[in-house]
Image (cartoon, helix red, strand yellow):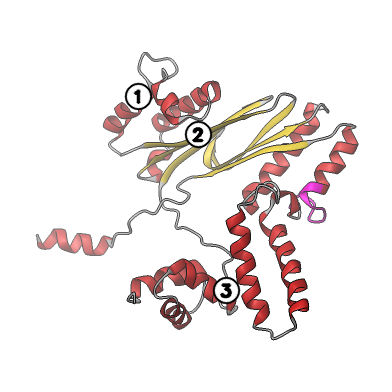
Amino acid sequence: MSKVTPALVKELRVKSGAGMMDCKKALTAVEGDVDAAIDWLRTKGLATASKKSGRVAAEGLVAVSANGTTGAIVEINAETDFVGRSDEFQALVRGIASVSFELGGDIDVIKGAKFPGSDDTVESTLTNAIATIGENMNLRRAERVSVEKGVVASYMHNAVTDGLGTLGILIALESEGDAARLEVLGKQIAMHVAATNPESISVDDLDPASIERERTVLSDQARESGKPEEIIAKMIEGRINKFYQEVVLLKQTFVIDGENSVEKAIDLVAKEIGSPIKLTAMVRFAVGEGIEKVESDFAAEVAAAVSS
């Protein structure tokens, strides 16, 4: 049987929003498995989070670049947010983004390409920047999207300068309609994605494991009500549909008008411009997303340095 440690209880409390004692009970019930404990808490109606939320701690910048039917987005990490404000680091990130725009999202291909305006490769330029700036840096991820006809729109939240910031989004809309109107719609959808962080574009491309996990939790919750199975089945389907409205982009309520679903908002613009519109790609990069940085006790470090 796995031991329930204070560290596990703290981790579960941060991820679930539940009380300390409830977290301890949940971990005890599932033998220390944090993910299973989150489901246990949700079944009991004690967790406030609907999904595991990782601690975001790494620093750096996201760059977005979009022009007509093509867009690229990259994330470069550094150790401190101070570096992200430096002209040298910003030029590095912007240069790597332009390489991704030309060559795509394969990290190895990008690293082996020439850095703009230099005979050095991107990898060598990054290594030199590490030596010059004095912080570890990493080209973490990159992606390029395009459409044959239509637009790729971009949005940067918390921008530090044009095209650079901490949260970037690309939206690809396929259509033969007016490009200017598509650009406006694409940016609005990108702003929506920045705010809601959907898991998928449509129900069809939602991770089946995510659906099954949700269905299991909802089934356990419904059966605790003691209602007949036929009523429970209807309850589960209703709650699954609500789940879709929370995590699927096209099913979410469009934050721009607060009334229609994103899917309906797209249909309305399609009628306006007289051409079908298909949302073919959604990319959302937040700096440090999913990377856990080791926390340090600064006071303890100072005390240790003084006593050594």
Q: Position of residue 61 (x, y in %)?
A: 47, 39
- Mark 1: few, some, or many residues within 10 Å (few <14, many ≥20)? some
For the question of whether residue 7 can be seen, the reply is yes
Farthest-out residue, bottom: 226
**Residue at the front extreme, as displayed:** 229
Q: Which residues are magenta?
A: 255-263
Give me the C-alpha separation between circle 3 and circle 1. Answer: 48 Å
In terms of image quadrants, where is residue 107?
top left
Q: Residues within 10 Å of mark 3 (few under 14, many from 20)?
A: many
Where is mark 3, residue-wise? 42
CA separation in Å, label 2 and label 1? 17 Å
Among numbered discs 3 and 2, the one appearing first in the sequence: 3
Callout 1 secondary element: helix
Residue hosting label 1: 125
Q: Are marks 3 and 1 in contact (CB under 8 Å)?
A: no
Residue at point 90% right, 38% down? 271
Specify whether residue 65 is in view: no
Identity of the residue drawn at 53% across and 75% down: 40
Q: Which mark is residue 142?
A: 2
